[in-house]
Image (cartoon, rainbow, N blue to C red):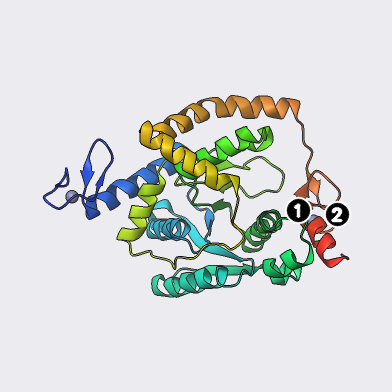
Amino acid sequence: MKCSFCNKKAIYNDGENRYCKEHFIEYFEKRILDIIEIFNLIEPGEKIAVAVSGGKDSVSLLYLLDKYKEDLKIDVVGIHIDEGIKNYRDKLKNYLLDLAKKHNWEIKVYKFRDYFRLTLDDSVKIERRLKPCTICGVWRRWLMWKAAKDLGVDKIATAHNLNDEVQTIFINLFEGNIKDFVKGGPIVGIVEHDFVPRIKPFYLVTEKETTIYALINKIDPPWVECPYIYGQTRDEIRKWLYKLEEDFPGFHKKVINKYLRILNKLKISYKKTNRINLKPCKYCGYPTSREMCRACEIKLILLGHK
Ligand SMILES: [Zn+2]
Ligand SMILES: [Zn+2]
């Protein structure tokens, strides 16, 4: 099959057009720049941090934003959180740092051990009642906030794509987690006290499209899986959604369009009925509704003292 725009071999078909490598890159990058513009994700002059795990999606996002930083008139820095997971994070980190050298990317590494005195591997051995993903999620959010403050960034860009977001929508629905359900969208945290807003430039592109973009650009991280990821709801939901997409092509896009249509109204009415007053954590300054934030609380449980 030939590309719809030239004589070269097509590698992707979006249902309307077929794309060769070059035309796919053009198509993909234009979509991302459109998403940034439509949702007003980035303003000229801003410093944008990319949360870069070393996986193909986040590296692709860093690659793309770095490529267009002059056009967008922004500064770009990568923040890499190292939880301390042997044979997983170290491999991705090394891959990322090598690639960064080649492309001249600025990457800042923030380690759990430097801030919580424990790696994630240490933590799970101490307290088995706390799930690894709970510790990791809370501390990662805290450290990303800390890093963003340190580096004076205006926004944090994450590589969540259409499939990730639809999975999250269903997980929150099934768990009855209305608070997180209304927290979605391509830009979050813009008004909350002292939080750095998060933007998702890949919001409307599919996992398949981000994978192709990574492959064409030779972004090919080592194939490793987090050892703590088992029996997670997300995995089951992903499989279920994958089947639905096969049976009803365009299912994910339909869900996201409906979600976006109701999201603003939901956010407004949720805020009216649930006034959450955030104030700085007494011990670390992180915005929280309690005296001690969850990150400090977990540290206290694990280390036994402040
Ligand atoms: Zn072409
Ligand atoms: Zn705290």
Which amino acid does the dot numbered 2 rest on? Lys
* Alpha carbon separation for disc pair 1 and 2: 8 Å
One can see residue 203 in this view: no
Q: Nearer the viewer, residue 47 or 134?
A: 134
- Tell me if residue 71 comes above or below residue 277 in the rendering: below
Q: Which amino acid does label 1 sit on?
A: Tyr
**Looking at the picture, does residue 27 appear above or below residue 270?**
below
Label 2, residues with CA under 10 Å away: few <14, some 14-19, many ≥20: some
Pick the quarter of the image with the C terminus. Answer: bottom right
Whether disc 2's CB lies below 8 Å from ligand 2 is answered yes
Q: On the rendered structure, is 191 left or right of 50?
A: right
Q: Mark 1 points at which residue?
A: 286
Residue at the spot x=42%, y=71% of the render?
Answer: 99
| Residue drawn at 56 percent across, 41 percent down | 168
Q: Nearer the viewer, residue 125 or 296?
A: 125
Residue under label 2: 282
Question: Residue 230's spot in the image, x, y percent?
Answer: 59, 55
Label 1, secondary structure: give it.
loop
The residue sitting at 40% across, 44% down in the picture is: 206
- The answer to whether mark 1 is within 8 Å of ligand 2 is yes
Ligand 2 resides in the quarter of the picture at bottom right
Residue 60, image quadrant = bottom left
